[in-house]
Image: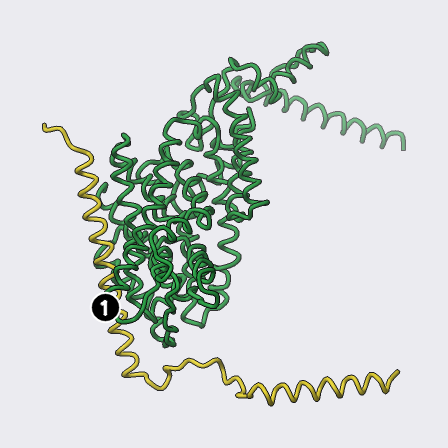
Chain colours: A green, B yellow
Amino acid sequence: MKLKQLIISLFFALFALTSMVQATEHEASAPEQQETTEHKPYVSKSISELASSWWSTTGISAIVDVHDGETTSDPRGHKFEREMTWFESSLGRIIMIIIVFILFYLAIAKNFEPLLLIPIAFGGLLANIPLAGMGGEHGMLGIIYNMGIANEFFPLLIFMGVGAMTDFAPLLANPKTAMLGGAAQFGIFGSLVGAVLIGFDLQTASAVSIIGGADGPTSIFIANRLAPEMLGVIAVAAYSYMALVPVIQPPIMRALTTKAERQIVMKTTRQVHRLEKLIFPIVVLMLTLLLLPESSPLIGAFAFGNFAKESGVVDRLSDTMQNSLINVITIFLGLGVGSKLAADKFLVLETMGIMVIGLLAFSAGTAMGVLMAKLMNKFSDEPINPLIGAAGVSAVPMSARVVSKVGSEEKPGNVLLMHAMGPNVAGVIGSAVAAGVLLSIFK
Amino acid sequence: MAEVNYVMEALKFMVLGMGVVFLFLFILVKVVELQAKLIAKYFPENTPIKAPATPAVDTEDENRRVAAIIAAVTEFRNNKS
């Protein structure tokens, strides 16, 4: 018995010894450079050292001590990052955080486009956190940005959802009103001239003036192609003016029309055949194919969404596009755009110019739509209420709702909503076409 | 090289842009009108897309029926209690 135990323990000892020898041999043969991946040898720190190293990583210190060599964050990677100026790392951040809270207020208390403003503003809040590098290549916002904004993917998915939500029946019932959606695109090209006058170069001016189309996704799409460094401001301007449709449009509409014109009652629209609705997205796509392939990403996504809806056999897909998908993308798009609200990107001189040009573009578009509608009313045998011209900007369906509201204020019971939806959806197509023209110029 | 007048360039962009937008929408309008005519001609029976046969009840009849139902329900409840 004793012998057996001895043998076993001896065996174990031998085994342990050999494996140890093997291990040491391994260690000896292992290359020396492994050390670089290992942690630094830990040196004992006094409690005051620990406290001060913690202090240097706090946001307070980053804001107060402006010469800490903190860099800006850029989703394209470290190569594009630079050291922050004193303004960006201190006062700028505070200003931006205040702006973010104003956006929260507008979204929550005033109900201005909350679906967009909440994610954008929250993204802006995150982007202004010192030292966290949220907008950097490996930060949360930076990852989102690279995933779908830098490559223009999210705007297209939004367009798909908008296509699946849009009913073209009002446009098909009264096709002439589509021309109003064209007139409103004057906002884009008129403000292009304005932007050049105040000193933007042509390419940037084109990117800025697309705000006049009042179309968030298109603005992002174009800004990305023509002036990526302006993307944040342009997107924020586009979405904030879209949110301000009920404030900006009515005064312009009232100023350009007489009371009698505003009270015009339009004929009820005819019933539209199902086939017409089904063929329409294909017709639009074919026209794009022939005249303006540059616009096909936008119009293609839009037409696909609409076709899936009108086909009537893929309700599951169209339901996903107009609900779940567009909601998911709205979250990502908002946060990604919000990352451009970082002080170092937003608080630049051009921002003021862009905000002014954007407002100008938007007003000019509305005005031109109304004037065109007045003209059409003069020459048309059917009465056309000039108010519906204002819906030519592509803020669907806000501006159609605004038109309807103003119309029913002038004459209770006069419902213009369906009539205004025609120019409104034509405006979406119009601004996508205008975007294609601008892209084709700078190709 | 001659100095490029950017404002003139922008104006040219405007002419081109508005031209293309209107051309596009104009053709679209014409095609849609043609399409509406063709469809009305060749597929006329489907033209009025009715909601799947909503029973044609005139409101008065409907009101009477609702009244009868309400009366019956109140009667039933009163009996129960």
Residue under mark 1: which chain is it in?
B
Nearer-the-camera pick, A175 or A204: A175
Image quadrant where residue A261 sits: bottom left
Q: Residue at x 57, y 85 (%)?
A: B59
Residue corresponding to mark 1:
B30
A24 displayed left or right of A135: right
Question: In the rendered image, is residue B34 in sight?
Answer: yes
- Quadrant location, the C terminus of chain B: bottom right
Q: Is residue A128 left or right of residue B26?
A: right
A324 shown above or below B61:
above
Q: Is residue A258 above or below residue A127?
A: below
Task: Specify few, some or many for label 1: CA neighbours under 10 Å numbering under 14, 14-19, or 20 or more.
Answer: few
**Vertical relation: B29 (above or below) A5:** below
Where residue A296 appears, as percent x and y from the top left, is 30, 54
Q: Amino acid at mark 1?
A: Lys
Q: Position of residue A417 (x, y in %)?
A: 43, 64
At a point 42% along the width and 51% down the height, the residue shown is A250
A270 or A148: which is nearer to us? A270
Residue A161 visible in the shown view: no
- Horizontal side of B59 relative to A386 (left or right) equals right
Give the camera-side residue of B48 and A122. B48
Q: Quadrant of the N terminus of chain B?
A: top left
